[in-house]
Each structure stands twice: as structure tokens, then as C-alpha cells.
């Protein structure tokens, strides 16, 4: 079986890690398969070289900046991409493209639509959706509809028998069916969950290291948000919790964003915390090993309001660290059906807003910051929050060792790398 795996880039992040997992799982379980990775940028080519997997890089495949293009510019880009890819793939190739329809490079989406119509087996492995990002969706409409004069829905969700879609959760599975893809060509592929480490990390030793590196008081609970901060991660809510519990907890955030638009948002929150002496430790992941931070934390937290799979709900448990924070029901419901329990999550964080109560996540950045400033200036408002939100009275909650062991067992059983690779290969066999 010949398989080409594509993504716009292989920068550090969630999709890149899944591609690395996919490649490793295929090699372990299907050594006769011929695998190559094709991308617009790769920072860790050594990973693939060690697995004896070829990586082909062409910057034309990377993100395309939205601007006023001339038609000939787009046609030239289309031709360059198509001809280059055609020289790399065989007529029997399975084309496995990650986030094909996200709107990061609509010309690349059009190129793969041409390959699809030529009879290649095409898999759109959808981690995220342009439909959830108005700017991305508008970019797709502009390039595919206005420039290439194609019906957008037919390009994004074609009815071809050689097309299939892989999804991370049941919510996205149902929406792709609604968009018109045949149910026989839609597959549910929850991400694999495992830790890249050869030696088990002692939680006590890791905690001592985190206390030392970040100069944290020994009596504090260490609460880490293992995230690259972008807007949907709702970092303002973590800042709010820091303001409520700075006397007993230290909050860490691991990574800064790379996207220029997201960097502006992120720096605004960093500046806000610095100016108002709110002690969030940002970019902790640049100061010591990620696994050490997670294993050394008393809890990992997520305040995100939208996820595709929800790795943050699962990965920390494998290192002995329980997960607390905001619940995203359409993500956690899938996971709980696999036997993983989440007794430490909350569904909303209510605050007084004019003459009503609203969930803090529904405020924009400016209003979130204004409310946090009110907490700093008016101590009574803190008490109001404790009365409105019962979960705050026992935050962070106690957790039993038995639950950690139970969740570890369920995660290892249901989200293994081998199981993931076999799910995808079964789908390949179904459609190829």
C-alpha cells in the first residue's frame, strides 16, 4: 500500500504530533506499507529520518496569506503545486491530507480536488473546520468560488466514491453527514494518547524540579494549562482563577502562539497580568521539559471553549496528574463513553453582568479584563463569585489515587497507538 501524508506544515503542535503518531503506528503495524510525508515546512525532519520515512518540503504548500490576488498568480501557484505533487505520487497512492478544508491554503484544496477527480483515493482528516472560523471560510469562498468558479460545497464535501473523511468526535461526524458526505465514507478516529518518554517520571521529583525552576512556594498547589495560547483557549478565565486563588495556587501556561494575529491577543494578556501584578507564569515550557511540568503539577487545567478532540482532557492523567477545568460536553461525552471519568470539571463560571448573570467565557477580551480589574479593586465581588459558583468552594478539588489509576487504564486501553493505526488502515481497505 502506498500512502502519502500531507499537512501545510510540521511545526510543533497538535496536528504535527498526530502525524508523527500516525507514521509511527503505521510502521509498527504495517511494515510493508510505503509511507512518505509531504509538507510546506518541517522543523523535526530527524524524527522521520530515524523511521526511514521520506519527507518532501515545498513552501507552496504552507499557509497562504489572504490578499488581492491576480487570477494568473493563483493559476501559476495551482500549476506549480499540482506538477510538483504529481512527480512524487504514484497512480496507486492513497492521499491522506490533514485539515484539507480548513482554509489555510485554498489553492492546495483545489489541487487535491483535481487529484480526487482523477481517481486518487483521498482522505480529509479533519481536526478543525473553516465553518467555525469566519475568516477562513470567507477565504475559501473567495479563492474557490470567485477565482476558480467552483461550487464551494462540492469541493469541500464531494460525493466521489474515492473520497472519505476522518473525524475526531461524534459532533463533527454528524455535521459532515449533514454536509452531504455519505455515511459509509465517514470514519471516527479519536486521537491516540501516549507519552513520549523512555523513563517513567516520578511525580515527587518532578514537582521538586518545578518548584525550584519557577521559585514556587512549597505549600502552593501547582496548576498548569498545557496549551499554546490562542483565543479559543479562553486564557482570560485562567487569569480570573489566578486572581481568586493566588494565595494558595501557582498557575502556569506552557506555550506562546506562533500565528501573528494570535500573538497580539496573547501579548495583551501577558501585559495585562504584568501591569496588574497577576502572577501567571507564561511560557513555562521554554524553561524546562514539558513532561516534567505536567508530572510535577498537582493539576492540569483547561479553560478552552472549543476543541476537536481534547488531548488536554486525557494526556495529563497518563503522567499521574488529574485534569480540572471547563467541560466541553460534545468532546468529553465521547471520551466518557470509553470509560474515562471527569468528576472535576465545571460547565460554567457565572459572573454578575449588569442586571443578569452570564458565563464568563461569553465576554469578549476587553470585558473579561474589565471584570478582573473589578475583582482586584472590590473584594466583595470575589465573594459574589464563590456564592454563584459552588465548585469554587472546593477548588482545586481533592482527587483519589484510585481515580488516577482507573483513568490511566481506560486511556491506555481505548486510545492506544496500535488501535489508532489499525482503525485508519481498516478505513483505507474499505475505500481503496
Image (spheres, helix red, strand yellow):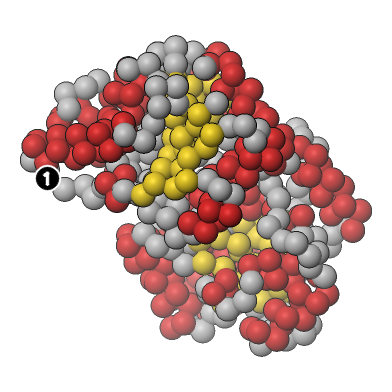
Crowd band around label 1 with a 10 angstrom C-alpha radius: few (<14), some (14–19), many (20+):
few
User: Residue drawn 39% across and 71% down?
Assistant: 267
Q: Nearer the viewer, residue 276 or 229?
A: 229
| Picture quadrant of residue 208 | bottom right
Q: Position of residue 34 (x, y in %)?
A: 54, 34
Picture mark count: 1
Residue 158 higher or lower than 325, as above or below: above
Q: Which type of secondary structure does the marked residue at label 1 adopt?
A: loop
Q: Position of residue 365 (x, y in %)?
A: 41, 61
Residue 388 higher or lower than 126, as above or below: below
Q: Position of residue 132 (x, y in %)?
A: 41, 39
User: Residue drawn 62% across and 57% down?
Assistant: 302
Q: In screen coordinates, is 78 left or right of 336?
A: left
Q: Nearer the viewer, residue 93 or 195?
A: 93
Q: Nearer the viewer, residue 226 or 342?
A: 226
Residue 283 higher or lower than 25, as above or below: below
Task: Residue under label 1, please give it.
Answer: 68
Res 363 visible: no
Q: In screen coordinates, is 197 left or right of 231?
A: right
| Picture quadrant of residue 272 | bottom left
Residue 179 higher or lower than 337, as above or below: above
Q: In screen coordinates, is 157 left or right of 204?
A: left
User: Residue drawn 63% across and 45% down?
Assistant: 24
User: Residue drawn 31% across and 34% down?
Assistant: 87
Q: In which quadrant is the N terminus drawn?
A: top right
Res 318 visible: yes
Q: Nearer the viewer, residue 79 or 268?
A: 79
Amino acid at each position: 500500500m502506498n500512502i502519502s501524508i500531507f499537512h501545510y506544515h510540521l511545526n510543533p503542535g497538535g496536528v504535527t504530533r498526530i502525524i508523527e503518531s500516525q507514521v509511527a503506528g503505521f510502521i509498527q503495524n504495517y511494515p510493508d506499507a510505503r509511507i512518505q510525508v509531504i509538507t510546506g515546512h518541517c522543523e523535526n525532519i530527524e524524527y522521520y529520518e530515524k523511521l526511514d520515512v521520506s519527507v518532501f518540503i515545498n513552501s507552496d504548500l504552507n499557509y497562504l496569506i489572504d490578499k488581492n490576488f491576480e487570477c494568473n498568480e493563483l493559476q501559476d501557484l495551482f500549476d506549480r503545486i499540482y506538477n510538483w505533487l504529481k512527480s512524487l505520487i504514484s497512480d496507486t497512492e492513497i492521499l491522506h491530507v490533514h485539515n484539507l478544508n480548513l482554509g489555510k491554503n485554498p489553492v492546495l484544496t483545489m489541487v487535491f480536488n483535481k487529484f480526487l477527480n482523477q481517481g486518487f483515493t483521498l482522505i480529509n482528516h479533519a481536526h478543525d473546520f473553516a465553518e467555525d472560523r469566519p475568516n477562513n471560510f470567507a477565504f475559501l469562498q473567495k479563492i474557490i468560488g470567485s477565482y476558480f468558479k467552483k461550487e464551494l460545497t462540492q469541493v469541500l464535501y464531494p460525493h466521489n466514491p474515492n473520497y472519505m473523511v476522518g473525524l475526531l468526535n461524534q459532533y463533527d461526524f454528524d455535521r459532515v453527514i449533514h454536509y452531504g458526505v455519505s455515511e459509509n465514507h465517514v470514519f471516527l478516529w479519536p486521537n491516540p494518547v501516549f507519552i513520549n518518554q523512555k523513563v517513567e517520571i516520578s511525580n515527587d521529583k518532578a514537582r521538586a524540579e518545578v518548584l525550584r525552576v519557577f521559585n514556587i512556594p512549597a505549600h502552593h498547589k501547582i496548576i498548569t494549562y498545557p496549551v499554546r495560547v490562542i483565543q479559543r483557549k479562553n486564557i482570560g478565565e485562567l487569569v480570573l482563577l489566578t486572581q481568586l486563588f493566588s494565595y494558595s495556587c501557582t498557575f502556569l501556561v506552557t506555550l506562546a502562539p506562533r500565528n501573528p494575529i494570535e500573538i497580539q491577543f496573547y501579548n495583551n494578556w501577558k501585559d495585562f497580568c504584568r501591569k496588574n501584578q497577576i502572577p501567571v507564569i507564561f511560557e513555562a515550557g521554554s524553561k524546562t521539559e514539558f513532561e516534567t511540568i505536567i508530572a510535577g503539577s498537582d493539576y492540569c487545567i483547561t479553560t478552552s471553549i472549543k476543541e476537536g478532540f481534547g488531548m488536554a482532557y486525557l494526556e495529563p492523567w497518563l503522567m499521574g496528574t488529574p485534569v480540572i477545568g471547563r467541560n466541553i460536553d460534545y468532546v468529553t461525552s465521547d471520551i466518557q463513553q470509553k470509560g474515562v471519568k471527569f468528576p472535576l470539571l465545571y460547565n460554567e463560571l457565572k459572573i454578575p453582568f449588569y442586571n443578569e448573570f452570564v458565563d464568563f467565557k461569553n465576554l469578549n477580551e476587553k470585558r473579561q479584563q474589565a471584570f478582573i480589574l473589578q475583582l482586584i479593586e472590590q473584594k466583595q465581588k470575589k465573594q459574589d463569585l464563590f456564592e454563584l459558583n459552588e465548585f469554587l468552594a472546593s477548588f482545586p478539588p481533592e482527587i483519589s489515587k484510585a481515580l488516577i489509576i482507573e483513568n490511566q487504564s481506560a486511556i491506555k486501553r481505548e486510545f492506544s497507538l496500535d488501535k489508532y493505526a489499525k482503525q485508519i488502515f481498516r478505513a483505507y481497505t474499505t475505500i481503496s
